[in-house]
């Protein structure tokens, strides 16, 4: 797979397994994708590239793969748990219909939203907000079992709102895995600059996150209980995002909706685009969206899962299929591909370029900009703002 730093040109590459997928992608995606190499068609600073890759390798191996490896080794049944329920999700995946999976959430009355002023900023106010999480699991089996792990029943978000009563174009920003601290995300998404451009902003806290930096968290529950439970977590995340969209539009805060998410937030954003027609602009940052493929790319999880699947007599095709409902490749997007931009790093070892390009192909070759970044290592103080601004101008988000 050949890439050039900058905007993707989609040059045909006979040696690449990256191509538009047929209907049931989990059956048609070549397993050779795991051996696909990224070839950079430009000269770059070798030392910089090496440092960015090393940083990603440390995060991926120690903080993600290593931690999960030992959790699984302690309780190996948990990562493949609820197996009798897998068929429920596999049958739904065959329909390729996101509206059957990500159901419209119940309406939220404005009186149910707790909105507390946090501080004043130039031209507006930052509010800390909370509203009830009325999500109901898709599978009746999880009606009570889902909340066994997910005990907090609120949707938390931080709202940056301009002075005055006029609705404004509003961006929803979603954080990465265990990176939900608002202060970090203010920097990543260049919140002050986007706010100054004229947008209201809502920072949505994803399930199992608190919005504050904590070393010991329950974020493991996002992926720790097998494909069935993980699908319900993503259904919950999509429900929360759609609830927030309705609240912003129905209460005169937003005139248009844009969404952007990084890493896990990009994962959630990709699924929102599969079901939500009210999104006018979408910028996904280094989206990690393919769970089984990631497991098979990340040492030492690869070795563990190869052994587990063999012992449990589970083919990799079945494993892919079991996660298909929480993968954007399963659905057609509801948002025009011309209104979607993906920003990702050529040195990224977590959101691998080959997976990102698969998503771009699926979305009718939407714009992809390859930046000389890793997943966590970036070389400028406002890493994505230039491209977010250019995208908003292209789709006329503020007009």
Image (cartoon, grey):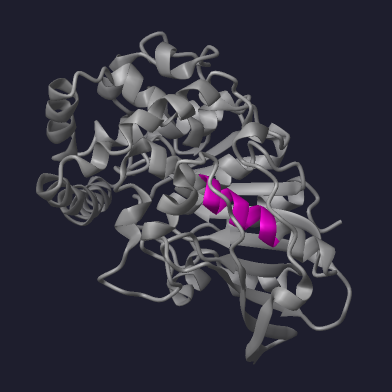
Image coordinates of residue 370 in percent, x first then y, are 47, 40
Q: For residue 277, which quarter of the picture?
A: top right
Residue located at (82% from left, 67% from top)? 168
Image quarter of the C terminus: bottom right
Where on the picture, by quarter, is residue 293? top left
* SS majority, magenta: helix
Asked whether residue 170 is in view, the answer is yes
The percent coordinates of residue 275 (x first, y second) are 67, 38
Residue 254 image offset from top left, x and y in percent: 80, 64
Relative to 209, residue 67 above or below: above
Q: Position of residue 389 (x, y in %)?
A: 66, 57
Check the image and report above or below for 348 versus 328.
below
Q: Residue at x 77, y 47 (%)?
A: 278
Residue 285 shows in this picture: no
- Can you say whether 175 is above or below 333 in the image? below
Residue at image point 50% right, 32% down? 325
Judge left or right: residue 100 versus residue 110.
left
Q: How many numbered dots are placed on residues in this image?
A: 0
Write the residue at 53% across / 54% down.
261
Q: Quadrant of residue 29?
A: top left
Q: Which residue ends up furthest to the top in the rendered image? A: 14
Is 290 within the magenta?
Answer: no
User: Along the horizontal axis of the image, is 254 left or right of 188?
Assistant: right
- Residue closest to the eye, 327 or 55: 327
Range of the magenta residues? 235-244
Image quarter (top left, top right, bottom left or bottom right) of the N terminus = top left
Name the residue nearer the viewer: 103 or 357: 103
206 sits left or right of 128 in the view: left
């Amino acid at each position: 797979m050949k890439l050039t730093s900058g905007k993707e040109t989609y040059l045909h590459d006979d040696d690449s397994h990256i191509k538009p997928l047929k209907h049931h992608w989990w059956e048609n995606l070549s397993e050779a994708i795991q051996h696909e190499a990224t070839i950079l068609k430009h000269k770059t600073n070798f030392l910089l590239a090496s440092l960015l890759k090393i940083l990603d390798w440390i995060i991926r191996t120690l903080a993600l793969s290593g931690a999960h490896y030992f959790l699984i080794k302690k309780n190996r049944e948990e990562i493949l748990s609820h197996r009798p329920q897998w068929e429920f999700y596999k049958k739904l995946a065959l329909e390729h219909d996101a509206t059957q999976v990500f159901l419209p959430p119940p309406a939220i009355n404005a009186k149910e939203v707790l909105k507390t002023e946090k501080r004043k900023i130039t031209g507006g106010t930052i509010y800390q907000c909370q509203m009830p999480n009325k999500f109901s699991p898709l599978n009746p089996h999880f009606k009570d079992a889902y909340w066994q792990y997910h005990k907090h029943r609120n949707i938390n978000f931080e709202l940056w709102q301009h002075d005055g009563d006029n609705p404004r174009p509003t961006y929803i920003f979603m954080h990465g895995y265990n990176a939900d601290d608002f202060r970090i995300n203010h920097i990543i998404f260049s919140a002050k600059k986007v706010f100054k451009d004229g947008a209201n902003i809502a920072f949505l806290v994803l399930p199992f996150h608190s919005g504050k930096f904590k070393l010991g968290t329950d974020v493991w529950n996002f992926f720790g209980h097998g494909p069935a439970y993980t699908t319900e977590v993503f259904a919950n995340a999509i429900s929360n995002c759609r609830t927030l969209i309705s609240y912003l539009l129905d209460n005169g805060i937003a005139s248009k909706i844009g969404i952007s998410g990084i890493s896990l937030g990009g994962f959630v954003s990709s699924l929102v685009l599969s079901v939500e027609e009210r999104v006018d602009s979408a910028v996904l940052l280094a989206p990690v969206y393919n769970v089984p493929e990631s497991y098979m790319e990340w040492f030492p999880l690869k070795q563990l899962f190869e052994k587990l699947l063999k012992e449990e007599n589970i083919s990799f095709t079945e494993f892919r299929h079991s996660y298909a409902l929480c993968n954007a490749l399963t659905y057609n997007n509801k948002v025009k591909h011309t209104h979607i931009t993906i920003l990702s790093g050529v040195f990224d070892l977590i959101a691998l370029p080959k997976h990102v390009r698969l998503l771009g192909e699926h979305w009718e070759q939407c714009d992809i900009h390859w930046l000389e970044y890793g997943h966590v290592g970036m070389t400028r103080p406002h890493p994505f703002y230039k491209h977010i601004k250019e995208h908003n101008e292209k789709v006329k988000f503020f007009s």
